Image (cartoon, rainbow, N blue to C red):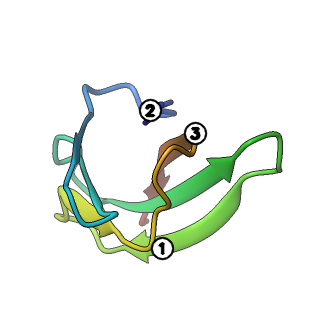
Amino acid sequence: TLNLAVNYAGLAGATAMNDGTVRLTWPALANHSFRIYRIQGTSSPTLIAGVAAGTVSYGVTGLLPSTDYQFRVRAVNAS
């Protein structure tokens, strides 16, 4: 099961792969880098990656089957 929560004013998507990987996507936002957080169960958000401005996707690996995950993509002003 995949739950996607987005903290970014654009559309985002998530595509689950068969190998425990999810590809998160979002529209480009000029002069902003992005931070990606994972929430598993009732735990607090965990920063799993930071990506540079111009990046529009990220592959999350190592996910377990039959487990609920939430992901947040947060835009960070690079200036």
- The kind of residue on which mark 2 rests is Leu
Q: Foreground mark, 2 or 3?
A: 3
| Nearer to me, 20 or 53 | 20
| Mark 1 to mark 2 CA distance (whole Å) | 16 Å
Horizontal side of residue 1 vs 10, given as left or right? right
| Nearer to me, 21 or 75 | 21
CB atoms of marks 1 and 3 within 8 Å: no
Residue 49: image location, x then y, percent: 48, 73
| Mark 1 to mark 3 CA distance (whole Å) | 19 Å
Horizontal side of residue 48 vs 2, given as left or right? right
The residue where tag 3 is placed is 68
CB atoms of marks 1 and 2 within 8 Å: no
Q: Quadrant of residue 33?
A: bottom left
Mark number, residue 62? none
Q: Is residue 37 above or below residue 53?
A: above
| Mark 2 to mark 3 CA distance (whole Å) | 10 Å
Residue at image point 17% right, 41% down? 27
Residue at image point 57% right, 39% down? 68
The residue where tag 2 is placed is 4
Q: Secondary structure at mark 1?
A: strand
Q: Foreground mark, 1 or 2?
A: 2
Q: Foreground mark, 1 or 3?
A: 3
The residue where tag 1 is placed is 49
| Nearer to me, 19 or 12 | 19
- The kind of residue on which mark 1 rests is Ala
In which quadrant is the C terminus drawn? bottom left
- The kind of residue on which mark 3 rests is Asp
Residue 43: image location, x then y, percent: 82, 49
Residue 59: image location, x then y, percent: 27, 66
Q: Earlier in the sequence, mark 2 or mark 3?
A: 2
Q: Secondary structure at mark 3?
A: loop
| Nearer to me, 33 or 12 | 12
